[in-house]
Amino acid sequence: MLYLSYLVTASGSATTSHLRSIYVKQNNILRNMTFSNYDAQVSPIYKRLNFFKAQDIFKLELAKLMHKFHDGLLPSIYNGLFQRSSDLHDFNSRYASNRNYFIPSVHSNIGKKLISYKGAVIWREIYAEYKNLPFHHFKKTMCNYGYIFKSACQIAKTYSTEYCFVYTLEHLLNQYWWTFVLIFWCSCFMRCLCFLLSCELLGVSTR
């Protein structure tokens, strides 16, 4: 992840055809790490290992850049890169009250890859309560990717329903295994008790 995050705010906005080789290599590395088949689906592997895909790393690093800009921690050369939506008009709209930035109007795919455009879009996807956190808290909170972005539901859709069920069951077993053990032994005890009571009522000796 360290090498993938190096200058990713500049290289991550390249076209998909140029980034495809990075995606393929990252997927193959994870398959080799987990001894999976060469054609195994990689989304469950990313989820199980808590790894980020290259495109998600780009979003996270760009979100960190936007947070630094929001707190005035970047050099002065970045001052004119983004413009607060609240500075454009005096209306207290919901978009401006959430401390969002103006999204420039673009009419081409090249324009949508500019940092001034993608940065404002990424910042809009972040929940408002996280935008004023200190940077070290914001960076730590971003480790839970789906918890800070509004578009987490879109990420969840990339996983199949079967995998989501299996992963949820695995998570519950890991977190509450003692509860399941207690329920199992209680059910065994209740079955034995019911069996003894039924034998006693029917006058059948259990010896």
Image (cartoon, rainbow, N blue to C red):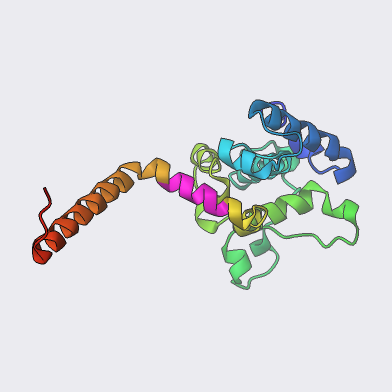
Question: Where's residue 128, x and y in %?
Answer: 54, 58
Please tell me whether the stretch drawn in magenta is mainly helix, strand or loop: helix
- Would you say 52 lies left or right of 188 here? right
Please identify the quarter of the rendering in which residue 121 is found. Answer: bottom right
Quadrant for the N terminus in the image: top right
Question: Where's residue 49, x and y in %?
Answer: 58, 35
Question: Where's residue 81, x and y in %?
Answer: 76, 48
Q: Is residue 149 among the parts visible in the rendering?
A: no
Please identify the quarter of the rendering in which residue 41 is found. Answer: top right
Residue 166 counted in the magenta span? yes
Q: What range of the chain is rendered magenta?
A: 164-172
Question: Where's residue 109, x and y in %?
Answer: 89, 55
Q: Taking 31 as reference, is 64 above or below it?
A: below
Residue lying at 75% horizontally and 51% vertically, measured from the top left: 118
Q: Taking 113 as reference, is 94 above or below it?
A: below
Residue lying at 50% horizontally and 55% vertically, measured from the top left: 129
Q: Taking 90 as reference, is 109 above or below it?
A: above
Residue lying at 66% horizontally and 41% vertically, measured from the top left: 65
- Would you say 186 lies left or right of 110 here? left
Q: Is residue 60 among the parts visible in the rendering?
A: yes
Residue lying at 20% horizontally and 51% vertically, measured from the top left: 189
Which of 197 and 168 lies nearest the eye of the viewer? 197
Which of 153 and 166 lies nearest the eye of the viewer? 166
Q: Taking 91 as reference, is 65 above or below it?
A: above
Question: Tag count in the figure?
Answer: 0
Please identify the quarter of the rendering in which residue 57 is found. Answer: top right
Residue 146 counted in the magenta span? no
